[in-house]
Image (cartoon, coloured by chain):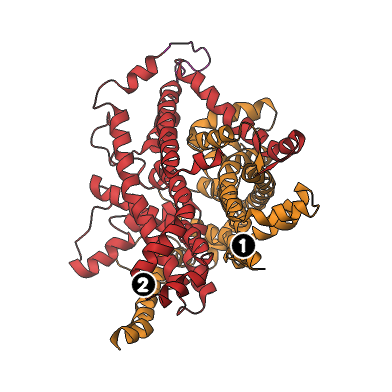
Amino acid sequence: MRTGAFSRYGVPILIHAFLVAMLIFALFPVFFVLQAAFRPGQSLYSLTLSLWPDHPTWDNFVYIWTRVPFPTWLKNSLGIGIGTMIAGLIGSATGAYALARFRFAGKRMTLILLLAIQAFPTVLALVPIYIILRTVGLIGSPFGLMLAYVAGALVFSTWNLKGYFDTIPRELDEAALIDGCTVTQAFIRIVLPLSLPALAVTALLMFLTAWNEWVMAQTLLLSEDAYTVPVGLWGLQDNYRIPWGYFAAGSLLVSIPVMVLFLGLQQYFRSGLTVGGVKG
Amino acid sequence: MYRTSLRLTLTYLSPMVVGVGLISLFPILYNVYISFTNQNLYHFRQYSIVGFVNYGKLFQGLDADFFIVLGRTFLFVAICIPLFLAVGMAAAMALNHPSVRFKPFWRVALIVPWAVPSYITALVWKFFFNEDFGTLNQLYRVVAGPHAGLPWLSDPTWAFASIVIANVWMSYPFFMIVILGALQSIPSELYEAAAVDGAPAWSQFRRITVPLLRPAILPATILSAIVTFNVLNTAYLITKGGPFISAAKPGATDFVMVYAFRVAFQLFNYSYIAAFAVVIFFLLFTVTLGSLRFTGLVREEAR
């Protein structure tokens, strides 16, 4: 049977060929950063392809860790990222639960307003945000920047989680309510555990939003001690040339926490928990 | 849908509503006010209300910056989104195939571009596209001879394509994860039943996979379209909006946010850009609302 042989061997081979091609596409830029981080001086500026430096060195890492306040920037970025994630998760999970399950006046309006805000370009709101933070005395502080990130993250996450809560069969929490659970108990014991994949993905998104952001941080942070990694790394370049080795070394160091987070959370990316809940 | 006390509803909603209201809604209203003034570099503190002057400037003629920038951005979104979806869908379906082993490895490896901060992504690709030292032209010279080179960033069309490539690299993992999550929540019984009934793979894809993926893909696509429309870092940091053919006209990669950022923070023309933002906002909002109404998502919520 030709089709049988094809689906047994041909399809897997094609799929693996595709995955390998994707792997090269996905990872080559990362590999590029890796080799640039170990490349001494300006040897990157070459006309011919060189995949690995002839004389690899740790100099770039040493420079970035000891000659600039990189550890402080890293600490600021981590604090802001985790703070944004936790505050955003609490706000969006409760808000999304109300929007998915409660019946109240103005719900449609709330959803539409959230979409409207999502449609407004963030960078253009920078000047008013600056004025608000200055008025309440939070300008230049990482906490003020975190508040700005949380508000932005809330809009996306609320929609995202609401969409997921909608896919959880209502019978599950309604049954709990009939059995005497309060609404909050149903939320904490039934809806949240069933939403772990969505919560993990949402949390990750919020962390990354804060972690990767450059424009707002550049505008709202004023002193080198308060900088996040993107602002700090960006400040390294002089007017003539991007110091590639330092940039690459710094980039590698900032990707480590993200990778750890990814590996820790990726088991929750597997969905299908809802289906299990209905089956019993 | 259950009825709850007003207090409980407010308790659940208020963290989100207060946060969004203070730091997202207020600046938007303030921006509308600025758009009716003449605030710019020369009138920074002593500005006055000037009415619709800024709006008039926006629509001065069909070759006004506004239309050029907007048209170019629409084209960018129209090219990017199908590519994101196609690559993300293909990767998700490959990952979900039963013959693939070491799934956690593949999944993590293919998510990696998403984990890379976009300002670093921009700098890496900027280097790849460099005409003399860039990796892409180094590779091209292996094929085409030592003096060859593609004008990645100096030719308008190539520059546009370069930004598209960098954005596909950066954005496909989001779709891959959204689609993979949805794929894994489709009960395998559906496919087993279809297989028993003799349905070929293609019609299983069309009749089971696509309809069940729709609820997950649609919101993701709309949000991603908005994000792509608002592209800033990857375009601004790679090309600075250029290449520019004339100094008075927007460059080839002057997408909406790049243009706004340039005019607001390099030329300090705040009020003009505020008006620009208001118009762009109404446009984006109408598109969003229209597409949601079309897909029936909002109407369903009104029950």
Stretch in magenta: B39-51
In front here: B121 or A171?
A171
Q: Is residue A188 left or right of residue B43?
A: right
Residue A122 x, y percent position in the rendering: 51, 36
Helix, strand or loop at label 2? It is: helix
Q: Nearer the viewer, residue B96 or A170?
A: A170
Name the chain under label 2.
Answer: B
- Residue B187's place in the image compared with A140, above or below, is below
Residue B47 within the magenta-colored segment of the rendering: yes
Q: Are marks 1 and 2 on the same chain?
A: no
Report the side of A205 relative to A9 (left or right): right
Q: Residues within 10 Å of mark 1 (few under 14, many from 20)?
A: some
Amino acid beneath label 1 = Thr
Please give the letter of the chain rendered in orange.
Answer: A
Using the image, determine if residue B244 lies above or below residue A207: above
User: Residues under labels 1 and 2: Cα distance?
Assistant: 26 Å
Q: Which mark is residue B201?
A: 2
Residue B229 among magenta residues: no
Task: Looking at the picture, tell me which residue is in the foreground, B153 or A88.
Answer: A88
